Image (cartoon, rainbow, N blue to C red):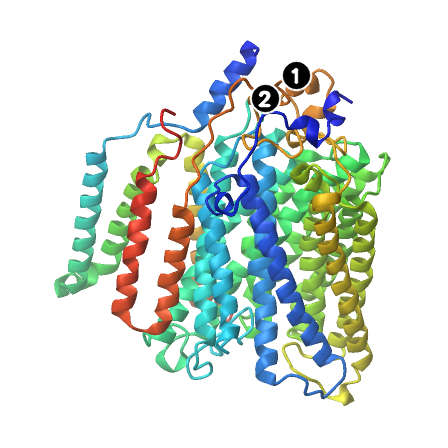
Amino acid sequence: MSSVGTQTVEQQHTSHEEDTGLWSWITTVDHKRIAIMYFVTATFFFFVAGAKALAIRVQLMFPEQELITPEVYNQFFTMHGTTMIFLVAMPMAVAFFNYVVPLQIGARDVAFPRLNALSYWVFLFGGLYLNSSFIVGAAPHASWVGYATLTMPEFSPGQNTNFWLIGLSILGIASIAGGVNFITTIINMRAPGMKLMRMPLFTWMTFVTSFLLITAIPVIGVALIYLGFDRLFGTVFFQPAGGGDPVLWQHLFWIFGHPEVYILILPAFGVISDVIPTFSKKPLFGYPIVVYAGLLIGFIGWGVWSHHMFTVGLGPIADSFFVAATMIIAIPTGVKIFNWIATMWGGSLKFTTAMLFSVGLVAVFTVGGLSGIMHASAPVNLQQHDTYFVVAHFHYVIVGGAMMGLWAGLYYWFPKVRGRYLSETLGKWHFWTTMIGFNLTFFPMHFAGIFGMPRRIYTYSAELNVDIYNQLATIGAFIFALSAVIMAWNLVKSWRGGEKAPANPWGAPHLEWSIPSPPHHYNFPAIPTVQSREPLWNDGEREAILAVTMEEPETEPVMPNPSYWPILLAASITLIWALVMTGIWWVIALAILPVIYCVFKWGMEPAFPEGH
Amino acid sequence: MSTDVKQNEAAGAADHGHDEGHASAAFYVWIGVILAVVTGVEVAIFYIEAMDPYEAPLLVVLSAAKVVLVIMFFMHLKMEPRFLTWVFMAGVVLATFMVSALVVLYHVLPVFGG
């Protein structure tokens, strides 16, 4: 191991002091700071959505309870799902994209740093706008899938659904801008020698996910605009009485919604594809196959949406096609699982917390995959649709898959971010309480669903005989909540007092570990040349890279100017969307002016310091 | 600093890209004018009754022409490496596939009993 592995945080910081005040964070365009802001915000929303989940579980612990009203229950499950998907799982993955991808490809920042800042601020304001609906007593209440005709004015007459459709429209802007940014960054800003097939798997999966983002989000954007027109202008896209078709909403929603599942899961697959080889001390087994499997998942993911709609009655030909496509997409997913296991096979395994979460993902996600195969069969699906079996399935996929992968990434990359380890003791407590709490919560739901408990129902009859499964699930939910508290405590405690970490604490193979921890604001004093997939594992190449990346530059590389226009533009964009709810059109028209002003000022502001 | 490193720095600096290969501002204004004129023609076609039989195909062709102009110039694809055109075309193929699938679901399969 070279000397890079032994330098601590103080030794690595000799030449540069960064501003740390509030204003420097508000105006930052540094991808690393934006990543931290994404992570902190997503973690905040994780606790907000988790509190709603606990309220749901307390309400369902015993049959025929009246602790919360049906309307509040509807708001809680709607906002739990909406928040977890759009304000937790997606942005937390984006936090990792932001921090890790430029470092992995040898870039000094993303391609469009100010656009990156805009993405974050739009996400933050969109999330706050969506949750402000609780303050005015009009939280969305038609579930995260917002099916027509439940969302039509006659069934949802207040502002509840308007908050939902406008909030998601705002958040979509952040997602599309982020997707464009990362595709451009990965295509254009790789270090010399880093061919596509030398990129770390996390970067590859970021690339595929970004492509899914810019193609899937516009579909729900169109659906939301139709919905908004139906609600605000009296159009009839989804109104059967006017010749519209509520099933069209389902098509549009799930054409977005199923790729969205892969938007959530592929980043986690990328994380563990980097973590498992590192802690197995072996290159990833079948690297090209894992890459192609990811691409295939991203592609086939577009052809399976109607498996969410088998009960609609599309007919045997359509159902047969979507059954086949859904069965087929299990193949590349299975290939990945096989490759992760084969990577560990015969390796020198080290079960750090990051590795535990990675292995946990493989185990738990496989359970979710198998229940997915079960209701991929249309006749079986007819029995399971809208029952707690489906709730169990998608939590195994999204929490057991996406979230556990991201927590693996948290423990893996935290030393790079902070120059200190997260506590491994607390980490293992976090992992085991997660595994026990998660499985105790969601595994019994399979049985509750099979025995006929419908989802999205605020209470259930004692005659259904599903009390025991609900009681186990509620106990599990509180253990799971405890795991989240342990994680938060670990973050707070280790941020200041964690054990100091060297630049490459895990002996990992990729470029992000070739620079000091935490990195300088310019990442790389000079851009290294890459010659292989695991550059830090190859003698000769490692030394050549470290000679470049650990060097103190005589003059620091020039980085983009900070800017306050992203936050102002994001506020203007959010304002104009929020004003749509007033229905006063001249006010909305006037609100375009600040948007135009911010765009103009942004355009005229120099991106780099004068003379560069 | 070694020669290699200096070369790498140059490569890194090139990442920021400058204005090589881009046309003048006036050129983009002209493209904008053409787009506005085509949009005007589209609106006119909608209101001219004699054009009714040809309305749909004409609007498809004119819209496609506008899309091509926007992606070539405002999205810079004409000035970018060919690889990016393929990236863009992947999205176009995907969108075509999805729209075709919906047309089949709504208009073809019902003819054959679902």
**Real-space CA distance between mark 2 and mark 1, rounded to the nearest whole angstrom:** 8 Å
Assign a secondary structure to mark 2.
loop
Chain containing mark 1? A
Assign a secondary structure to mark 1.
helix
Write down the residue under mark 1.
Answer: A544
Crowd rating for badge 2 (residues with CA inside 10 Å; few <14, some 14–19, many 20+)? many
Name the quadrant containing residue A71.
Answer: bottom right
Q: Considering only vertical position in the picture, is A603 above or below A362?
A: above
**Looking at the picture, which amino acid does disc 1 mark?**
Ala
Q: What residue is at 77 percent from the left and 89 percent from the top?
A: A463
Write down the residue under mark 2.
Answer: A528
Quadrant where the C terminus of chain A sits is top left
Q: Marks 2 and 1: CB-CB under 8 Å?
A: yes
Instruction: Specify whether A225 is left or right of A397.
Output: left
Residue at the top extreme, as displayed: B3
**Looking at the picture, which amino acid does disc 2 mark?**
Pro
Q: Residue A343: x percent and y percent?
A: 79, 37
Q: Considering only vertical position in the picture, is A335 above or below A550?
A: below
Q: Nearer the viewer, residue A12 or A461?
A: A12
Quadrant where the N terminus of chain A sits is top right
Q: Nearer the viewer, residue A457 or A590?
A: A590
Instruction: Specify whether A495 is left or right of A601.
Output: right
Q: Nearer the viewer, residue A278 or A240?
A: A278
Q: What residue is at 73 percent from the left and 75 percent from the top?
A: A449
Total numbered circles: 2
> Which is nearer the N-term, disc 2 or disc 1?
2
Crowd rating for badge 1 (residues with CA inside 10 Å; few <14, some 14–19, many 20+)? some
Q: Considering only vertical position in the picture, is A425 above or below A170?
A: above
Q: Nearer the viewer, residue A433 or A255?
A: A433
Image disc number at residue A553: none
Q: Residue A314: x percent and y percent?
A: 53, 70
Instruction: Specify whether A186 is left or right of B19.
Output: right
